[in-house]
Amino acid sequence: KAGVTQTPRYLIKTRGQQVTLSCSPISGHRSVSWYQQTPGQGLQFLFEYFSETQRNKGNFPGRFSGRQFSNSRSEMNVSTLELGDSALYLCASRRTGETNTEAFFGQGTRLTVV
Amino acid sequence: GESVGLHLPTLSVQEGDNSIINCAYSNSASDYFIWYKQESGKGPQFIIDIRSNMDKRQGQRVTVLLNKTVKHLSLQIAATQPGDSAVYFCAENEGSSARQLTFGSGTQLTVLP
């Protein structure tokens, strides 16, 4: 069974641009969460989707948005990029909407903003 | 887990010894915990989980202990191998209404030959 797949693996963008990252969860998994990982702040929750609905959002500005499609694939978008948005963006999938179940991560997308 | 800025604790062990990685969590309502291993350049890899109605759970070469009284979690790795070198994170699910994991700052485990 394939794991969580994130594309692209690496991105370099310029300040002010926007970016879209993609996540395909494990087959049959319906919940997708996004996290930002930086050396200074560690792993921080961005948002969680289940059945195409955003159920929870972390403490990030409105420049960070996401969506989930009917096939459970998810995208996140960051607009008006800032240098501080440089990070590893991780996606995790769960089989159900129950949050006390295993969450599996993808390899992440390394975003560098210059 | 400890939601503080990142001073990353380190642990060095000899190959073949047992490792114990500790984590203090913050929310007494947390009902589910996961340990992850993250190698350089990779995403976190699920190791083992435990629910709050348990105090111990064993996997292959790993054991997680949960002490709810003092809000402490530990991961024990038996017969540590070079491939175990990585950063280890504990994550807590802060109650049934929470839909996110809160991660600790991680511990860097280095296995010495």
Image (spheres, coloured by chain):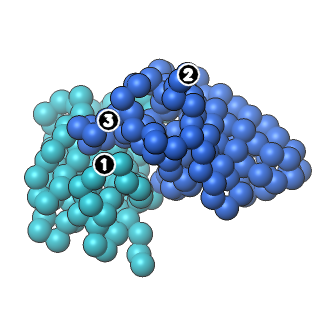
Q: Position of residue A21 (x, y in %)?
A: 26, 56
In three-dimensional space, the C-alpha distance between marks 3 and 1, rounded to whole angstroms, equals: 9 Å
Residue B87 appears in the rendering: no
The hue of chain B in the figure is blue
Q: Position of residue A107 (x, y in %)?
A: 44, 58
The circle on residue A99 is: 1
In three-dimensional space, the C-alpha distance between marks 2 and 1, rounded to whole angstroms, equals: 23 Å
Q: Earlier in the sequence, mark 3 or mark 2?
A: 2
Residue B75 appears in the rendering: yes
Residue at 13% across, 47% down:
A54
Picture quadrant of residue A105: bottom left
Give amino acid for label 1: Thr
Return the chain for callout 3: B
Secondary structure at badge 1 equals loop
Picture quadrant of residue B109: top right
- Position of residue A69 relative to residue A21, above or below, is below
Residue at 27% across, 60% down:
A96
Return the chain for callout 2: B
> Do the residues marked 2 and 1 share a common chain?
no
> Do the residues marked 3 and 1 share a common chain?
no
Q: Where is residue A73 in the image (x, y as percent from the top left)?
A: 21, 65
**Dot 3 alpha-carbon crowd within 10 angstroms: few under 14, some 14 to 19, many 20 or more:** some
Residue at 53% across, 23% down:
B69
Q: Do the residues labelled 3 and 2 touch (CB within 8 Å)?
A: no
Secondary structure at badge 3 equals loop
- Circle 2 is placed at which residue position? B70
Give amino acid for label 2: Val
- Circle 3 is placed at which residue position? B95
Give amino acid for label 3: Gly
**Callout in the foreground (2, 1):** 2
The hue of chain A in the figure is cyan
